[in-house]
Amino acid sequence: DVKVTQSSRYLVKRTGEKVFLECVQDMDHENMFWYRQDPGLGLRLIYFSYDVKMKEKGDIPEGYSVSREKKERFSLILESASTNQTSMYLCASSSFGDYGYTFGSGTRLTVV
Amino acid sequence: RKEVEQDPGPFNVPEGATVAFNCTYSNSASQSFFWYRQDCRKEPKLLMSVYSSGNEDGRFTAQLNRASQYISLLIRDSKLSDSATYLCVVNKKKSSGDKLTFGTGTRLAVRP
């Protein structure tokens, strides 16, 4: 089974901190995605990547950046965490042309 | 207007009932459609793809109406284990490739 592993299940950070969320997949998938999920707003795409060192903005990239130095790893960076970035963050991966995304179990981030 | 719209529910039904969820999408260029299931505090998982001709997977039937930009999911003989949030998902064509847009979900609660 494809596994997508997110480094932390729960995280509490202070306003202004730089935050790194890590995601690793073990099935050689080309595509990786970062979403955030908020009540009433559903899943919203932050950034995605179709290849190593490649990144594209999703629908809500402001306040975030990403890094994909290796195919299996896609990192989400909050440059200066703010309280409105408190959310559930979900990483997903898929093969090229395959819409069956596999999600990680999520990181619930609280910014205080 | 949201790209993908769903009734949030909740739908409260007894075991054995038949329940239907609907979803509309705004981008007429969308090519592929899916239903994902998300259990409470878990990550979304692909339930089934939706084809123009309609498709069935056991107790689940999905239908697509491109003219009305409308997708449906029918669950027959509901089980307690069907209780979850059902996410309507469409692809969104971008020059760099395809990516999925998720609806906010419809919550189903099946009672004994």
Image (spheres, coloured by chain):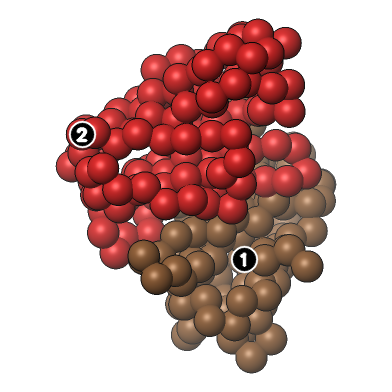
Residue A110 is situated, as x and y percent measured from the top left of the image, at 66, 16
**Position in image of residue A5 (x %, y %):** 35, 25
Badge 2 density bin: few <14, some 14–19, many ≥20, Cα 10 Å: few
Query: Mark 1: which secondary structure?
Result: strand
Tag 1: amino acid:
Leu
Which picture quadrant has residue A85? top right
Question: For the point 20% across and 34% down, which residue is it?
Answer: A70
Q: Is residue A21 above or below residue B67?
A: above
- Residue B7 at x, y percent in the picture: 79, 58
Q: In which quarter of the image is the N terminus of chain B?
A: bottom right
Which residue is at 81% across, 47% downward?
B10
Quadrant occupied by the C terminus of chain B: top right
Could you tell me which residue is drawn at 35 percent across and 34 percent down? A67
Q: Residue B103 carries which label?
A: none
Q: The red chain is which one?
A: A
Tell me the residue that label 2 is attached to: A70
Instruction: Confirm or deny contact between disc 2 and disc 1 (CB under 8 A).
Output: no
- Chain letter tied to brown: B
For the question of whether residue B78 can be seen, the reply is: no
**Left or right: where does residue B24 sit relative to residue B101?**
right
Image height of A20 relative to A50, above or below: above
Furthest-bottom residue in this view: B67
Q: Can residue B83 be seen in this view?
A: yes
Residue under label 1, please give it. B73
Residue A88, picture quadrant: top right
Is B54 positioned to the left or the right of A68 in the image? right
Spatial distance from mark 2 to mark 1, Cα to Cα? 38 Å
Query: Residue B27: x percent and y percent?
Result: 61, 76
Identified by mark 2, the residue type is Lys
